[in-house]
């Protein structure tokens, strides 16, 4: 991998809470092995571990540290499915193939869960569940999506508005799809635990050892690093967008997408009063918003997307404003940690998995659904190498497509901005419509209510006589009509003012970000 890329920046909460790991050496002597894996992220480590478990010798070359970029800096969501929309997947490959691919994506989720359990990983802290929430009240679209999920065999539950709002206390959410077998984790600690598990299986991991060139011809391929060489019968390219000059044609098929993540200061009991759901939450299929509760009373929040890397602290106020927009009851929120990570996204939004030429494999393009699909890809490629298993060919319909270079980045960025504006407009319109309907219902209820003052119960006879004896002669009734009438008008005016104020308060807060 290219060793001169700028370090991904920002103060990561994951790094602050990571388990201790040993310093790994850089490659200084030549190695001759069965398989060389280039890239020490989740995909590369999974391939290496699974090949070594099957008895083959493996070397991993990492240009910096294990999981230094997207693998150790993502949201930690472990979800079935792919970044591509399910309806688009079915339309392209057909229902039967889509079912098989969905099953593989679920196998990726299972692989992560089983690996955490079987290796006793420390600090990973899996928490069950994922809610995919709608910000618009489009019940027909939800039902169509649920029907399609059921057709491919997904394990899901449809949540009505009342159930969603009982768990997520915001009026800006409507219905949702719940995935009970999904979960979220500390991804850096998972990656570090996966590296340790790979080493326990016999893998040699060399850090700060970028692959500078590769000769993929012949039976034994040669990979050159600054201070050593690796000869291997099989090479796996798992370096994502950071393959750089090593394989420029391959890296050119990926759009580098940088996303921004923040973790709040401790919020105390008020967080559970707003977010009473322990799983992960997404309210968009794109960058905004994905979040979960961490460390008991902190909120981890991810949003925004750029096709170039920007200083993460610039997004601290923006992420806090997104939280305030959904959960104003939390008050002012401070971000203690803000960081970014750069992932590789393909044009078709599906991972790149398979054999490029005899003995040269690729596992890349996991942007949008990285943890489950990288685990799935690692298992598929290990089986292809050792057992000649052809299952990876299910993904052959998603070929390598040039991402368009700088122009492609510009198109991706403007497309994201347009989608985000469209989502914001649709969500605000749905919110305003609901507020207006609620106001109309309250007005109708008030109009139907009787305007009579409640009748006090009659006092006992003896008490009534006593009161009558002590009461002076009343004045004429006409003397009291004026003030009483004015008092009723004043009460009515107050009620109308209160209704108007309620409407104003309930209207969405417009913010320029």
Image: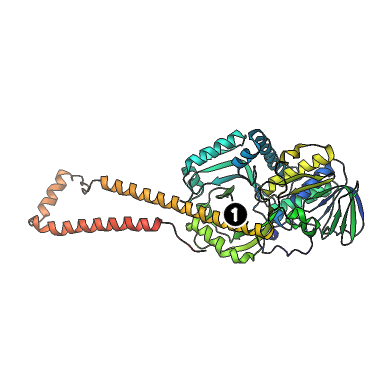
Quarter of the image for residue 54 reads top right
**Camera-nearest residue between 283 and 336:** 283
Residue 152: x and y in percent read 62, 35
Q: Quadrant of the N terminus?
A: bottom right
Q: Is residue 103 above or below residue 25?
A: above
Residue 176: x and y in percent read 53, 43
Secondary structure, mark 1, is loop
Quarter of the image for residue 17 reads bottom right
Residue 486: x and y in percent read 18, 59
Q: Is residue 285 above or below residue 259?
A: above
**Camera-nearest residue between 311 and 456:** 311
Seen at 40% across and 50% down, the residue is 433
Can residue 129 be seen at all in this image of the molecule?
A: yes
Total numbered labels placed on residues in the image: 1
The residue at which mark 1 appears reads as 287
**Camera-nearest residue between 227 and 297:** 227
Determine crowd level at label 1: few under 14, some 14-19, many 20+ residues with C-alpha closer than 10 A. Answer: some
Q: Is residue 408 left or right of residue 239?
A: left
Residue 260: x and y in percent read 62, 59
Q: Is residue 221 left or right of residue 326?
A: right
Q: Is residue 404 left or right of residue 482?
A: right
Can residue 299 be seen at all in this image of the molecule?
A: no
Q: What's the image's color scheme? A: rainbow
């Amino acid at each position: 991998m290219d060793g001169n890329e700028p370090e991904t920046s920002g103060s990561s909460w994951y790094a602050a809470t990571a388990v201790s790991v040993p310093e790994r050496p850089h490659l200084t002597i030549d190695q001759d092995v069965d398989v060389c894996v280039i890239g020490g992220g989740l995909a590369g480590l999974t391939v290496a571990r699974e090949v070594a478990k099957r008895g083959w010798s493996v070397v991993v070359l990492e240009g910096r540290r294990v999981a230094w970029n997207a693998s150790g800096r993502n949201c930690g969501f472990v979800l079935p499915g792919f970044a591509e929309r399910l309806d688009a997947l079915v339309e392209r490959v057909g229902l039967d193939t889509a079912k098989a691919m969905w099953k593989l994506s679920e196998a990726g989720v299972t692989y992560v869960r089983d690996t955490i359990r079987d290796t006793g990983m420390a600090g990973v802290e899996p928490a069950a569940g994922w809610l995919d929430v709608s910000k618009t009240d489009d019940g027909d679209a939800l039902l169509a999506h649920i029907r399609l999920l059921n057709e491919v065999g997904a394990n899901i539950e449809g949540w009505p508005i009342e159930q969603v709002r009982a768990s997520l206390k915001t009026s800006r959410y409507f219905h949702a799809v719940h995935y009970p077998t999904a979960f979220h984790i500390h991804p850096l600690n998972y990656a570090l635990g996966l590296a340790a598990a790979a080493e326990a299986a016999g893998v040699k991991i060399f850090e700060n050892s970028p692959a500078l060139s590769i000769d993929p011809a012949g039976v034994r391929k040669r990979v050159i690093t600054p201070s050593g060489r690796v000869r291997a019968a099989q090479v796996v390219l798992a370096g994502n967008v950071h393959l750089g000059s090593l394989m420029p044609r391959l890296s050119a098929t990926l759009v580098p997408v940088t996303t921004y993540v923040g973790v709040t200061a401790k919020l105390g009991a008020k967080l559970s009063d707003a977010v009473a759901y322990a799983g992960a939450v997404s309210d968009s299929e794109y960058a905004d918003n994905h979040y979960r509760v961490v460390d008991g009373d902190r909120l981890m929040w991810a949003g925004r997307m750029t096709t170039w890397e920007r200083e993460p602290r610039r997004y601290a106020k923006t992420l806090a404003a997104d939280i305030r927009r959904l959960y104003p009851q939390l008050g002012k929120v401070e971000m203690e940690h803000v960081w970014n990570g750069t992932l590789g996204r393909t044009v078709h939004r599906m991972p790149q998995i398979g054999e490029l030429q005899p003995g040269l494999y690729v596992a890349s393009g996991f942007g949008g659904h990285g943890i489950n699909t990288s685990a799935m890809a690692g298992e598929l490629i290990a089986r292809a190498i050792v057992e000649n298993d052809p299952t990876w060919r299910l993904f052959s319909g998603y070929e390598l497509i040039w991402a368009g270079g700088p122009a492609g980045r510009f198109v991706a960025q403007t497309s994201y901005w347009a989608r985000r504006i469209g989502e914001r407009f649709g969500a605000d319109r749905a919110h305003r419509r609901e507020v207006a309907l609620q106001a109309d219902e309250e007005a109708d209820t008030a109009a139907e209510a009787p305007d009579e003052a409640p009748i006090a119960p009659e006092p006992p006879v003896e008490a009534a006589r006593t009161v009558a004896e002590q009461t002076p002669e009343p004045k004429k009734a006409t003397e009291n009509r004026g003030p009483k009438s004015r008092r009723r008008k004043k009460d009515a005016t107050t009620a109308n003012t209160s209704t108007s104020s309620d409407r104003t308060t309930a209207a969405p807060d417009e913010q320029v970000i």
